[in-house]
Image (cartoon, rainbow, N blue to C red):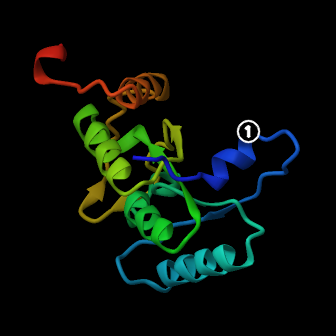
Amino acid sequence: MVAEANRLKNAVIDPGTFCITWEQVAGKGAFEKQQETIFQNAQRAAKEGKVHGISITDSPSGNPAISSEMLCAEIKRLGIEPLVHLALRDKNRNQVESLLYGLAAASVRNLLVVSGDYPTKTALGGKAKPVFDLDPTHVMQLIGLMNRGLVITLSSRP
């Protein structure tokens, strides 16, 4: 299988290109106006060709929002490279590994791995407790293993 071109990656690594990403902030809820606006902006960016990628925040300021991974899979289908913010604050290692498999299956190849903000507001039913199971360095190591085709099995885990 031939790897498809990644316009965002190519712009990032080309010293002669000024790479432009357009950050969008995911909103709370599945069908909110904010989500519609993100998709409209992604379509516009894909059509105009000036923006190399659309960057989607992951529960900014530790507040719940629609999944950046889900939004980015749809943005990819709209014809522009998405950049997933992967905030580790709320995810344990099993969830991170599962999300990475899902993103690979959706051909989403651009990640910004961050620790994430400590939750500051109350979510439904109370204030969320952060997980912080892995830090960005460990997740980058995991991604490296997965990119080399190594499958993480139960026997290889502590």
Q: Percent position (x, y) of residue 145? A: 37, 23
Position of 141 relative to 19 (above/below): above
Q: Which of 45 and 62 is in front in this view?
A: 45
Q: Is mark 1 on a helix, strand or loop?
A: helix
Q: Percent position (x, y) of residue 9? A: 64, 46
Position of 113 relative to 134 (above/below): below
Q: Quick check: 106 left or right of 22?
A: left
Q: Which of 55 and 132 is in front in this view?
A: 55
Q: Name the quarter where the C terminus is drawn.
A: top left
Q: Percent position (x, y) of residue 104? A: 37, 48
Which residue occupies 51% across, 38% down? Answer: 113
Q: Which of 106 and 85 is in front in this view?
A: 106
Residue at the limit of the structure toward the left, as seen here: 155
Q: Percent position (x, y) of residue 91? A: 32, 41
Amino acid type at mark 1: Ile
Residue at the limit of the structure toward the front, as seen here: 1
Q: Quick check: 56 left or right of 97?
A: right
Badge 1 is on which residue?
A: 13
Which residue occupies 65% across, 52% down? Answer: 8
The local crowd at label 1, few if under 14, some if 14 to 19, many if 20 or more residues have their Cα within 10 Å, is few
Q: Quick check: 119 left or right of 13?
A: left
Which residue occupies 35% across, 40% down? Answer: 130
Number of residue marks: 1
